[in-house]
């Protein structure tokens, strides 16, 4: 079985979707699937290498516009790869107009699977132009996959007339092995704890972009004595640093920058509480919540009424607070940091909850779906 994954970008530079595609590709390869992951590079340097048992092809890019790579070569590369491999399945990860365009250049006889990661939220004007094409491709897909039923229920962009038998819920999986401490990361964890100087440590991680809500989290520090470690980087970092200084909380915020994957165990294990303060449904799942839970940490997220709240079950694995409410967020963090027993209880329940999100189960479900599609025709 030969599968072409349109992975958007390479996961080492980007977020949850890219990490999901990388994990799925790696695990599918162990099941005997020949996987090619076609992505846009960060710059004009392309590459074609084997990674974790699958082929990773990066196409040169001129940059990004409206969260989409300017990599026209991706269309031609997809055609060239298909001439070479004769793919059985195309797997798209939407929203991503570039891979959508590239898929249209390939024969309609190839089975098409679409994973719907989230609605398009911010680019309203462009959506008005693009949505008819988006609805068309989802209607034409052989299968539409989402990580939770909430993805389907909350979406305003997935056509409601797509038959139920073509909709499939396959939860994301996560590789938890890198989150186990080793001697080096244990030392780094202790250094992070020391930086907090005895205060409760809150960890948040993600690209510094509008929908992550990190500005709300920084404002919430006025209502709790917590120390915040904010991981990641992005265009809003200078504004967030200025905000922390203006609010007089910069001495309780550590901007760690981009955290190497091999160091993440230290950060998740160092914190008392993990926070995902997102303010838009562009945050449709939140894989980082599972990473925190795998380390036995309770999570505080926002009430987005989508997959985020399926992962973090309010009152069971942590708490969900109203969106864009720094007072509620601050009080919730303060409550958890003051109550050791509650924090321990929620953390252990969160750890048990991660059993529902394994990479082998996720990959096996996709493998069966591919097999079913190839054994039947619509």
Image: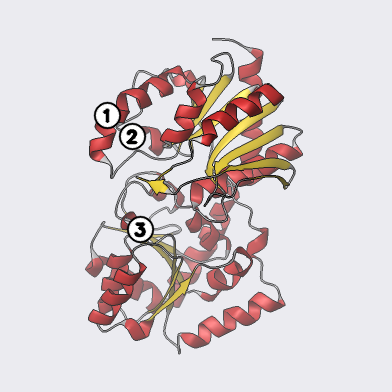
Q: Please report whichever mark, 2 or 1, sits nearer to the chain's N-terminal start.
A: 1
Q: Secondary structure at mark 1?
A: helix
* Above/below status of 336 relative to 70: below
Q: Which mark is residue 111?
A: none
Q: Residue at x 60, y 63 (%)?
A: 261
Image location (x, y in percent) of residue 277: 34, 61
**Quick one: label 1, few (<14), some, or many (20+) residues within 10 Å?**
few
Looking at the image, which is closer to me, 315 or 330? 330
User: How far, Cα to Cα, is label 3 from label 1?
Assistant: 24 Å
Q: Marks 2 and 3, how far apart in space? A: 22 Å
| Secondary structure under the numbered disc 2 in the rendered image | loop
Percent from the top left, x then y, of residue 141? Answer: 48, 21
Q: Where does label 2 land, which residue? A: 155
Dot 1 corresponds to which residue? 129
Q: Would residue 196 be seen by someone viewing this image from the given angle? A: yes
> Above or below — where is 59 with respect to 341?
above
Mark in the foreground, 2 or 1: 1
Tell which tag, 3 or 1, sits nearer the viewer.
1
Q: Is residue 61 above or below residue 322?
A: above
Residue corresponding to mark 3:
209
Work out whether mark 2 precedes mark 3 in sequence or the reverse, and give the earlier one: 2
Quarter of the image with the N terminus is top right
């Amino acid at each position: 079985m030969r599968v072409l994954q349109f992975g958007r970008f390479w996961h080492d530079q980007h977020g949850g979707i890219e990490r999901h595609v990388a994990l799925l590709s790696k695990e599918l390869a162990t099941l005997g699937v020949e996987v090619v992951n076609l992505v846009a590079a960060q710059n004009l340097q392309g590459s074609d290498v084997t990674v974790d048992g699958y082929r990773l092809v990066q196409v040169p890019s001129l940059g990004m516009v409206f969260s989409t790579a300017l990599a026209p070569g991706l269309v031609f590369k997809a055609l060239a790869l298909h001439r070479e491999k004769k793919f059985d399945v195309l797997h798209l990860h939407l929203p991503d107009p570039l891979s959508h365009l590239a898929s249209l250049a390939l024969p309609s006889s190839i089975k098409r699977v679409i994973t719907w990661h989230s609605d398009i939220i911010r680019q309203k004007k462009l959506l008005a132009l693009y949505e008819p094409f988006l609805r068309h491709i989802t209607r034409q897909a052989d299968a539409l996959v989402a990580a939770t039923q909430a993805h389907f229920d909350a979406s305003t962009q997935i056509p409601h007339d797509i038959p139920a038998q073509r909709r499939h819920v396959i939860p994301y999986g996560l590789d938890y092995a890198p989150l186990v401490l080793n001697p080096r990361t244990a030392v780094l964890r202790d250094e992070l704890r020391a930086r907090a100087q005895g205060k409760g440590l809150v960890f948040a991680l993600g690209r510094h972009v509008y929908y992550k809500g990190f500005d709300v989290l920084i404002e919430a520090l006025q209502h709790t004595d917590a120390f915040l470690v904010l991981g990641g980087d992005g265009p809003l970092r200078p504004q967030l640093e200025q905000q922390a200084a203006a609010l007089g909380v910069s001495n309780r915020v550590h901007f760690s920058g981009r955290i190497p994957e091999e160091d993440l165990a230290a950060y998740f294990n160092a914190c008392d509480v993990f926070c995902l303060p997102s303010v838009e449904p562009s945050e449709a799942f939140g894989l980082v919540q599972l990473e925190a839970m795998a380390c036995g940490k309770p999570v505080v997220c926002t009430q987005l009424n989508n997959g985020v709240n399926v992962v973090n079950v309010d009152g069971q694995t942590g708490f969900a607070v109203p969106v864009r409410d720094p007072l509620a967020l601050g009080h919730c963090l303060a409550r958890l940091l003051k109550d050791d027993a509650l924090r321990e209880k929620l953390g252990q329940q969160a750890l048990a909850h991660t059993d529902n999100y394994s990479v082998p189960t996720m990959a096996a479900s996709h493998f069966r779906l591919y097999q079913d599609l190839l054994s039947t025709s619509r």
